[in-house]
Amino acid sequence: MIFLELKDIKNISKFARFKISNMYHSKISGLGFYVPENVVTNDDLSKLMDTNDEWIQERTGIKERRHVALPEDTTSGMALKASKIAIERAGIDKNDIDFIVFATLSPDFYFPGPGVTLQKDLGIKNVGALDVRNQCSGFIYALSVADQFIKTGMYKNVLVVGSEIHSKGLDMSTRGRGVSVIFGDGAGAAVLSRTEDLTKGILSTHLHSQGEHAEELALTAPGMGTRWVTDILKDNDPNDESYYPHMNGQFVFKNAVVRFSEVINEGLEANNLQVSDINMLVPHQANLRISQFIQQKFKLSDDQVYNNIMKYGNTTAASVPIALTEAWELGKIKEGDLVVLAAFGSGFTWASAIIRW
């Protein structure tokens, strides 16, 4: 019979944890995105509210965005289209998917979340599905969750999705123009797969929140903690804005540029990397002016930063996977490249992912 002292057990436990955490990495094996065909230009919006192309481009950099028009283009429906592309590109069968992580602020239903709908619509086995509600940072949060499942050996292939419909919930009048001109609809998906090459894949993820500023960028109703649907109907107030998004634009901008910089630097430092090592930065497409500020601060060239907000607007949780997929499709990301994802948004939440492609 073998007897072990407590210190020996602790040492074995530490070794086991070390082995598990260093056994696998997760890599992005497939990417896909989908945006509705319905293009809404700034001139189109000028017919609905007091705005114009110059005003919108000057403040946001946005020229056009997509709004859903087809009945099947629900939040889960667009996710399905993006997911099918990602799965095909990953070179796996759909039933090889072990788990789904779905990031959105615009679910099909109040509950259940769209992850289970996507599982059904894909026609795959009864795998687990998890929904993430972290708005603009949602996809990187979802990517981080999937990364942990793979690194611990629990799952081999995880489908990570960001999908949003904003157009149906915006105040498309002059009153709401500060928010409504920014947002668009779309979906992006990534298949995260296990790899034993510890020099490749997701090197680290970094997640943060600051709830004291939650109401600076929020949609507060209907909600169980504020006003429910019955309250809204009872009040019957034509000036009620509680069920439209509220954004303190300048305050959000000032915080975003600081947190973007911090979380990018945090990721680089954690991996003993320098800004000069970055081959491609894919920032959340919140506002072209924010992306340009970060690019100038880090002294990155146009070839080192990918932006497409000009075409699609801000698609919150979908913006990072849409931009990442498009950059990859255009050949701007190659094997061995250091790719940095970064996001900031409602919560406030912010996040980054450092990836060796």
Image: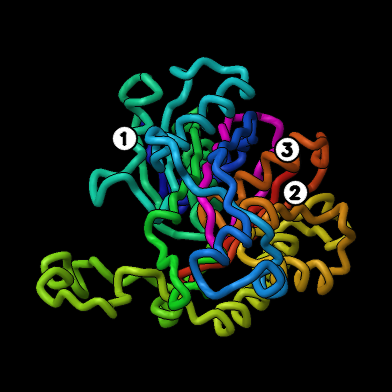
Q: Residues within 10 Å of mark 2 (few under 14, many from 20)?
A: many
Q: Is residue 26 left or right of residue 294?
A: left
Q: Is residue 166 above or below residue 73?
A: below
Q: Is residue 2 left or right of residue 186?
A: left
Instruction: Kindly state the secondary structure of the residue where label 2 is placed.
Output: strand
Please name which of the two marks, 1 or 2, marks the residue nearer to the observer: 1
| Residue sitting nearer the eye, 79 or 200 | 79
| Residue sitting nearer the eye, 144 or 42 | 42
Q: Label 1 vs label 2: CA separation?
A: 30 Å
Q: Is residue 342 above or below residue 37?
A: below
- x 70%, y 52%: residue: 308
Q: Which residues are magenta?
A: 183-206
Residue 57, given in percent of the width and then of the height, sits at: 70, 68
Residue 50, given in percent of the width and then of the height, sits at: 54, 75
In which image quadrant can residue 128 be found?
top left
| Residue sitting nearer the eye, 276 or 270 | 276
Residue 243, given in percent of the width and then of the height, sits at: 30, 69
**Disc 1 target residue:** 116
**Disc 2 target residue:** 339
Mark found first going from the N terminus, 2 or 3: 3
| Residue sitting nearer the eye, 49 or 71 | 49
- x 25%, y 76%: residue: 238
Instruction: Kindly state the secondary structure of the residue where label 1 is placed.
Output: helix
Q: Is residue 312 visible?
A: yes
Q: Label 1 vs label 3: CA separation?
A: 31 Å
Residue 60, given in percent of the width and then of the height, sits at: 66, 69
**Disc 3 target residue:** 200
Mark found first going from the N terminus, 1 or 2: 1
Number of numbered discs:
3
- x 46%, y 36%: residue: 79
Q: Is residue 122 above or below residue 197?
A: above
Mark found first going from the N terminus, 1 or 3: 1
